[in-house]
Amino acid sequence: MGSFLMQKYSHAEREHSPATLAHLPAASTTKEEAATPQREGAFRGDRVSPDTLLALQRTHGNQSVQRFLQRSAATVQRKEMRLGGGEFLDVDDALSKDEQKEQIAEAKAIIKDIEKTYGVKVDSKAAVKAIFKSYFPDGKVPRSFKRDVQPAPWKLEELKNLQASLKHYAPILGKARKQVQDADFQSTKQQLKSVGKVNLGVSDDGAGPYTEQDTLGETFGEKKKTVALMQSLMTADHNFAGDSSKQQRGTTTHEFSHALIQDEKLDDFVATFSDYWTDESTAQADANRVSTATPPAEAPITYYGGTNAGEDLAETAKFYFEAPDRLKGGDGQPKGTPGNPAPRRFDFFNKIVLSWTNAPDKVDAMVASQSAVQFQKFKDLVDAFVALPDASQGLDAISALYDAITAEHGPLRDDEKARADVILLMQQATDKYFDLMVQTIMGLIP
Amino acid sequence: MGISQTKAALQELFDLRTLRPDEARQRFGLRAEDVRGSASYGALSGLTELYQAETMPGRLYYAGDEFALLYVGKASQFQADDLQKALGEPAARLRTRAGKQFHHLVYPDKGVAFSRPIAGGTVSILEIFPPQSLDAYKTKYYQDPGSFKE
């Protein structure tokens, strides 16, 4: 037993059972047990030295130590590996050491990129602090909350999803924000400073704070500096059935709308959708959030979006980036009911995204820079593409664009591969990608 | 704005409860386009809404000629702590559509309710209505947002 313990013991790792890795108090565990893995240096049979165990035996008795060891020996399947800065990576213990090292290196690289490129720190302790500051403004956080609400370890896929969600907002993040074209963003500073992962949410419905697993993500602070992503998000799929990875990106993108878009664009959003929103808190809708206007106004893309205009905007962002066709085409609900086609909301957000880079002007600049070539047809098609309301039309337009370019300039470089590249981009085609598509197509011209 | 000023500002809003629709139209210089029929709020429907952003502190709702509600969507002139001190302990603290980090404080016997950030700041939703029981308020005016997930 001693050698087993010594073999598994590492200062740089925390090892847990799947149940404890969920960081949610299981019905069969006490709060102490559930909270234990969150604390560095906590007594775990798989990571404590024999001397420590002897000390534990003296203070807690044989039976306690026996239970402790049984629990630990039976459940070691995953472990948390230190990433630096107080962050941990949850890795599969069955992976080889090299594979684990690769995951650690990749996770560290993502965290570094997020900070360097987007000016956002991955900081789960800051997220916990933000929760406490919001729900215990007097600073008196009860011991039970300090014990139960803890930073949670990331999985590599979660960090990748976080990075992908930040990429949606790349033009208004980090150094890129200095180049942003939209005046509303030029005049304001980036609010989002950190994102963290936390095991439990805290809510207060009026009777006092309590821990819960309903909250998937939350944005904190008057200046919306910190976003917390909850452990419960990692298995959620309420918007994207069977695709928790998409849900992670969707919810993260939703939170980033609160942190990065809301202050700049909410008034404009409310004014644009004044047929549904009386103001940012009140809708012209019934108890089911169905528009009471005659004829019915376009309702939010989800029921949750009908909570208030900020949530509506954030849900719009979620679907704009993660499911644009659903935003435009709806989820089968009639106009006026949440889940209806929301093409006006798509257009609203599309204009925001295009305004960041002033993309049409960029195209003009690119065209001008290629003065030796007649690009008018190309430009006309790009303009037409930008104005298209849905991706399927986008495919046709890009196809026509491709044909026009090849007709004008002859076959593109490595024709078959080039066509494949364009088709791949077409499959991703939404207006938000058009700038990328144009650049790619330009790059294909010999 | 201190407590006494808060009380005075609140009283000015309370006084609007006595205005009849035609008096409100005259007092705030309302045009035909500032009056909307078939309006609703909470469970109340068939209301008449009077609103002109430049001249009015909020939206006035009438059921026929009877005052139903003064609604101020963003009452940022009020500091939440000051308003709470001015009104005392609420009869109920409820969740609010203003957001997860807000509470809705209800004073039904005084005919006022407002949403405030838990951590302090300015008042969000402010509702002034005829004094009534808490149950009546919940039935007629309150809109439970449900739990906030994101």
Image: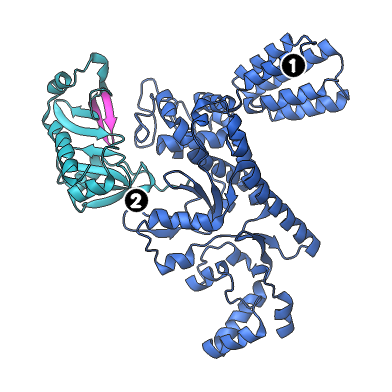
The amino acid beneath tag 1 is Ser
Q: Chain in blue?
A: A
- Magenta span includes A173: no
Q: Which residues are magenta?
A: B38-49
- Magenta span includes B45: yes
- How many numbered marks are there? 2
The amino acid beneath tag 2 is Ile
Residue A176 occupies which quadrant of the picture?
A: top right
Query: What residue sits right under mark 1 in the picture?
Result: A369
Res. B118 mark:
2
Say which residue appears at 88% left-offset and 25% top-offset. Answer: A414
**Image quadrant in which the C terminus of chain A is located:** top right
Residue A183 is situated, as x and y percent measured from the top left of the image, at: 51, 26
Task: Please state the chain letter of the residue tagged with numbered disc 2 in the rendered image.
Answer: B
Q: State the hue of chain B.
A: cyan
Task: Please state the chain letter of the residue tagged with numbered disc 1 in the rendered image.
Answer: A
Kindly indicate whether the residue at mark 1 contacts the one at mark 2 (C-beta within 8 angstroms). no
